[in-house]
Amino acid sequence: MDGSCGRSEHALFDAARAPRQVKTNRRQLVRRGVLGGAATISGISLLGTGGLSAGAAPSESQDQKIFNFALLLEYIQAAFYSEAVDHGRLRGEVREFAEIVSQHEREHVKYLQAALGPHARERPALSFGDATHDQRKFLAAAVLLENTGVSAYNGQAANLTKKALVAAAEIVSVEGRHAAWVSDLAGQDPAPRAADPGVSASAVASTLRRTGFLKPA
Amino acid sequence: MEQRPSGDIFDSCDEFARTLAEVDVGGMLAETASAVSAGTRASFLRRCLGAAAGVGALLTATDAEAAIAATKNDVAILQFDLVLEYLQAGLYTEAERLDALTPSTLAWARVVGAHERAHVRAIKSLLGRKTVPSPGFDYGNVTSNEQAFIKTAVAFEDLTAALLKWQAPRLDSRSILAAVVTLHSVETRHAAWIRHIVGLEPATTAFDKPASQRKMAELIDSTHFVASKPRVARKAQPPYSG
């Protein structure tokens, strides 16, 4: 599984584009029914740390690292919304939001998996606790995950090759829409400031760690 | 090549973070930090964007003379964006002043207007001496008619986000790119927000497609908002293929 290398840049992205035409199957994600301790989502300051983590000149191998990091985020988002939809405890427009957005996040996962091919990381073990049952906790977690997604992609934009950037821009654009939508549903400011600063990978990792959603292997 | 995360998921996160931190040493981040402490435009940018030091650093590019160092291509893109931001800032500011829209729309216009005015200042700052003056605008009844305003606002926010996606890979400077993407996602927030207010679906697809400067120029033309010609013509189509 790990032996393939030397795919050309074009092959990488052509392969990635193909699945986007295909309709996604509903609920493909493996359900993780594990109920750990309640996820603690405190008011983590998302946008105050880090900034541009300007790495070496963009390269295909750096794209891979960044896409794999993005894939981790998308795995979490996709699993979170799928589980929330499956539990059927959300109401009204929040439910509609979860249904639509879970579909988007699954498409992001499929895109990144296809782009990465054999280098794609595996799904992490996840546990969302009450956040997929309780509407109020769901909204808080969704706002956090979407804002984290925006700041993570923005933080890496300048580190990507042009081709990878094209794809990442199409994805972060949708994350920004999700963030505004769910913030409005949660009674928070959909666009809290004039610029969405990029956040370093380490700050994103800390935020993810603090959600308690990722289970140590 | 990339190895599979073998142990704790946190370890693989941290490892990735360390990788980027290592390559950053002595890199752009350090340079931007010193540019910020040196003053120049940074404090101004921090003020107008009201964000953490990171934003000031991003929008200040790598050094105080970044604006002058920008390539002709990047200057053309930024000038185009500046005129677009002038147009939007003017539209929302006038709507706020006339006070004729519904409260929810007006509340949106107030917040978004402030953002677009901040974007004007940020882009001017990036351009330095290459800045261009605002054309004269005539918005007709659009700033006082609810339906006309909403239609226009949705079109401009959706298309601005699409335009920035088109421009991003065409920028030469990674510093300018890093700054522009922080504006891009805010435009997508504006678009989703106004759509939500008026009952349109905020996010209709998993991948938002780009739209060219020509497309945006066509939208601007169709509105007849530009009463006196802007200096930036639509010739600004930077070369990028692939």
Image (tube, coloured by chain):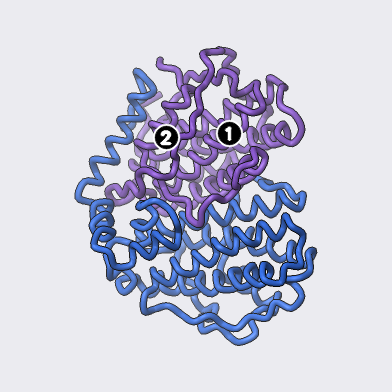
Chain colours: A purple, B blue
Q: Is residue A44 above or below residue B11?
A: below
Q: Position of residue A153 (x, y in %)?
A: 45, 45
User: Which residue of the protein is positioned furthest toward the bottom in this rendering?
Assistant: B228
Residue drawn at (64%, 74%) of the image: B220
Decide which of B206, B150 is in the foreground and name it.
B150
Q: Earlier in the sequence, mark 1 or mark 2?
A: 2
Which residue is the site of mark 2? A68
Pointer 1 indicates a residue of which chain? A
Q: Amino acid at mark 2?
A: Asn
Residue B31 left/right relative to A122 = left
- Mark 1 vs mark 2: in front: 1
Q: Please indicate, yes or no, whether residue A21 appears anywhere in the rendered image.
A: no
Q: Amino acid at mark 1?
A: Ala
Q: Residue B102, located in which quarter of the rendered image?
A: bottom right
Give the class, few, some or many, for how many residues have Cα within 10 Å of label 2's Cα (few <14, many ≥20): many
The secondary structure type at the circle numbered 2 is helix
Which residue is the site of mark 1? A142
Residue drawn at (43%, 44%) of the image: A47
Residue A5 left/right relative to A112 = left
Q: Please indicate, yes or no, whether residue B79 appears anywhere in the rendered image.
A: yes
Alpha carbon separation for disc pair 1 and 2: 21 Å
Mark 2 and mark 1 in contact (Cβ < 8 Å)? no
Q: Position of residue A17 (x, y in %)?
A: 55, 44
